[in-house]
């Protein structure tokens, strides 16, 4: 289940708790069949309208007032700072970034994240990379392909670019990340696994 689906299920479950409408229960039950981030948002909005009709009053008014504030605190639109994720994401492309819910749902392999990483000048820079390995995973490269725990990864997003890396086992609390543009990206091949706490957001659109 994707991050937008998990967030939508939490919101709808709370909003429709105790609902007497059969359609209200169907909103949650059918959520898994909805595909696409915007479709999930529209489906969630429909479920909140059901809750609105059934629960007019002070509590719902307060909740409705909080929704925009929560959305602003949770999501942001930001430009891609470099070509590390090209051609998946180009320099200057604007993406929707989840800054909060990933801390509740966790980070998965394959997630594209906004990361604070160490630079060559003893400073830090912000990058966008793909999570390849979680704590305990062993990452290696053979024949230009990335292997995780001995299994070669299917990486169509690299468009056939070869990858060279040194074997490493990801320590506890750390992530191994790579840019899709392996020829130019500075990632865990250069600065090693990074603390999961350095992740500032997860790209969801």
Image (tube, helix red, strand yellow):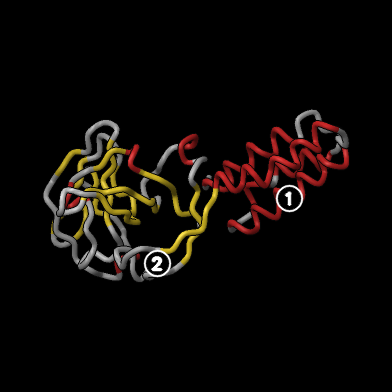
Residue 45 — which label?
1
Residue 29 — which label?
none
Foreground of the two, 138 or 120: 120
Which badge, 1 or 2, is on the more N-terminal residue? 1
Residue 80 sits in which quadrant? bottom left
What x and y, as percent, mark residue 49? 81, 46
Lateral position of residue 70 relative to residue 76, left or right = right
What x and y, as percent, mark residue 164? 14, 59
Foreground of the two, 196 or 106: 196
Quickly name the residue at label 2: 89
What residue is at 70 percent from the left and 41 percent from the top? 29
What residue is at 25 percent from the left and 50 percent from the top? 124
What x and y, as percent, mark residue 24? 80, 40
Badge 2, how many Cα within 10 Å: few under 14, some, many 20+? Answer: some
Identify the element where label 2 is drawn: loop
Task: Give the answer, above or below, for where 42 lies relative to 8.
Answer: below
Task: Give the answer, above or below, for where 175 lies relative to 142.
Answer: above
Q: CA distance from mark 1 to mark 2?
A: 28 Å
What x and y, as percent, mark residue 158? 29, 66
Lateral position of residue 71 relative to residue 179, left or right = right
């Amino acid at each position: 289940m994707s991050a937008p689906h998990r967030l939508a299920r939490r919101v709808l479950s709370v909003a429709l708790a105790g609902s007497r409408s059969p359609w209200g229960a169907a909103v949650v039950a059918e959520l898994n069949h909805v595909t696409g981030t915007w479709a999930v948002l529209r489906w969630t909005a429909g479920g909140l309208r059901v809750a609105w009709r059934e629960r007019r009053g002070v509590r719902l008014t307060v909740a409705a007032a909080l929704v925009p504030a929560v959305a602003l605190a949770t999501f942001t639109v930001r430009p891609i700072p470099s070509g590390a994720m090209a051609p998946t994401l180009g320099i200057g492309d604007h993406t929707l970034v989840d800054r909060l819910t990933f801390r509740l749902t966790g980070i998965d392999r394959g997630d594209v994240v906004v990361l604070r990483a160490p630079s060559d000048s003893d400073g830090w820079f912000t990058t966008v990379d793909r999570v390849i390995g979680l704590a305990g995973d062993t990452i290696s490269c053979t024949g230009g392909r990335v292997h995780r725990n001995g299994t070669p990864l299917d990486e169509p997003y690299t468009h056939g670019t070869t990858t060279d890396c040194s074997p490493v086992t990801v320590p506890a609390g750390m992530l191994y990340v790579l840019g899709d543009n392996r020829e130019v990206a500075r990632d865990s091949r250069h600065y090693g696994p990074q603390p999961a706490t350095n992740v500032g957001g997860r790209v969801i659109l």
